[in-house]
Structure formats: C-alpha cells, structure tokens
Amino acid sequence: MEKIKLYSNLVSPPGRTVQLTAKAIGLDLEFHSIDILSNEQLSEQFIKMNPLHTIPVIGDSGTILYDSHAIAIYLIMKYAPESTLYSQDPAKQAKINAILHFESGVLFARLRFMAEIVREASDMSEIPRDRLDYALKAVELLEALLMDKYLAGSHMTLADISCMTSFSNMDCFLRLDREKFPKVFAWFERMKEIPGYWEINQAAIDQFGDLIRMIFESNKKKENRLYE
Ligand SMILES: N[C@@H](CCC(=O)N[C@@H](CS)C(=O)NCC(=O)O)C(=O)O
C-alpha cells in the first residue's frame, strides 16, 4: 500500500494532531515539510490541494483532505474504525465533536490570533493585552471543560489530542501558572504518556520556544537598524 502523504510542519498544532492520531492507530505517514515561515503554503501547487492554504493536508491515493479534525476522523474511520479515539455511537461522537469544535473555534483560533502578531513583535510585552487575555480565557474554558480524567470522559479520545497540541503551543507563549489551572496541567501530564508524545509534541515545543526567541531577536535587530 502506498504511504499516506502528510504535508505539515512540526511546529503546527493541527499538524501534530494528525501525526499523533496516526501514531495512536499505527499508521505510518510520509512526512512532507511545508515551511510556513517562508509562505510555502501560498505556492500554486499547495493552493491546488488546499485553497485555504493551511497545513495539515493529506494525500491518500488521490484523496486530498485538509483540516486536522476532518483528517483525523477520516484516518480513524478508514483505518481503525474500532479505535476508542473516536466513537461509532452518535451521542459519544457528538461529545467528541463538540470539543473538536471548541478546539477549532476557540482554543486554536485564539492561539493563532496571538501568534500572528509575534512575527512583528520584539518580545511578549508587544502582544496586545486583549489578545493575551482572549487566549487566557480559552485556557479557563479548557479548565472548565475538564470534568473527568479526559475531555470527553474517562478515556482519551481525539478531542484530547487536538486540544493538547494547541494548549502546549499556548503555554509556550503564556507560561501559564500551574496552580491556576490544576485540572489542565494534571491532564497535560497524562497526555505525555500517549505514543509519540516526546518525539512529536515535546520536540515541537522545544523547537517552537527557540523559534519565538529567534523571531524576537531578529525583530529587535531590525528596530535597532532604524536608528543607526
Ligand atoms: N482548522 C485548521 C487550522 C489549520 C491552520 O490554521 N494551520 C496554520 C498553521 S498552525 C497554517 O497553515 N497557517 C498558514 C496560513 O494560514 O497561511 C486545522 O485544524 O487544520
């Protein structure tokens, strides 16, 4: 069988959701790195696959799909329908879907709103307060959602993978106080036990932290040059 192609970047939370889902169901993907810092996703070739020019995208024997949530559900339903990461039961499925919509519409959207401005900033103090507060509020909502061991109940599902990848990037920016979010941090610790966490998620977080520092430093140099 031809390997499924994944077009993504390790620093992308939705991209890692697909990588970790594949890992959990034992699927080996062929990784194609897309450099979003140099806007590779805006190339004609990429836009043909995804007019929304977002990563991740997969190619599975001619089937091209975008959006991490849609891709992860597709992979589970096609290759591991018995997996407990998703469910065949309509009520359980709806519960997982509701959290996936929260991730897409609130958690990731607010992370992106904050991250977009980093490209122009010299340090975190330059991120507008309302963007930081908006992101923080999303973490408060995540804390409120955690009424059991995992987001959709007592076992880990796709909802947890999806929220964890975005949450971990958010924590890189906000350096959250563990005491204020005890349920979130206890859940995050549990999530570190999933297959691939260290080589996929932690590796990305380390890289992401360095990337933010590099962007800040380079923006500071640009500012200094103005006054030379
Ligand atoms: N809802 C989408 C969001 C994907 C997304 O916004 N990805 C970002 C990277 S984390 C991206 O591709 N940004 C580049 C762009 O929008 O041009 C998903 O879950 O796949």
Image (cartoon, rainbow, N blue to C red):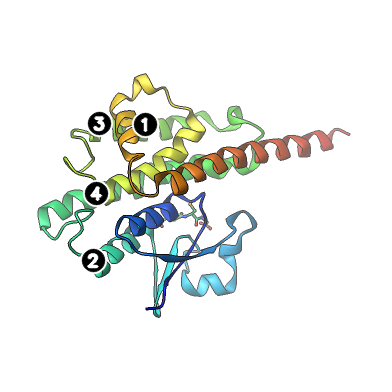
Instruction: Return the x and y of residue 95 as percentages of the image width and height.
Output: 17, 48
Mark 3–mark 2 Cα distance, whole angstroms, equals 29 Å
Nearer to the camera, 137 or 80 = 80
Q: Which kind of residue does numbered mark 4 sit on?
A: Thr
Q: Is residue 214 left or right of residue 183?
A: right
Residue on which the image places disc 1:
137
The kind of secondary structure element at disc 4 is loop
| Vertical comparison of 170 with 71: above or below | above
Nearer to the camera, 161 or 126 = 161
Mark 3–mark 4 Cα distance, whole angstroms, equals 18 Å
Mark 2–mark 4 Cα distance, whole angstroms, equals 13 Å
Q: Which kind of residue does numbered mark 2 sit on?
A: Met
Instruction: Return the x and y of residue 170 as percentages of the image width and height.
Output: 45, 37
Q: Earlier in the sequence, mark 3 or mark 1?
A: 1
Residue positioned 71% across, 36% down in the render: 217
Q: Earlier in the sequence, mark 1 or mark 2?
A: 2
Q: Earlier in the sequence, mark 2 or mark 4?
A: 2
| The C terminus, quarter of image | top right
**Which image quadrant for residue 141?**
top left
**Other residues around mark 4 within 10 Å, as few (<14) / some (14–19) / many (≥20):** some
Residue positioned 36% across, 31% down in the render: 137
Q: Is residue 135 left or right of residue 121?
A: left
Q: Which kind of residue does numbered mark 1 sit on?
A: Lys
Residue on which the image places disc 3:
144
The kind of secondary structure element at disc 2 is helix
| Vertical comparison of 116 with 67: above or below | above
Badge 2 vs badge 4, beta-carbon distance below 8 Å: no
Q: Which mark is residue 157?
A: 4
Instruction: Return the x and y of residue 146 as percentages of the image width and height.
Output: 23, 34
Q: Which mark is residue 77?
A: 2
- Disc 4 beta carbon < 8 A from ligand 1? no
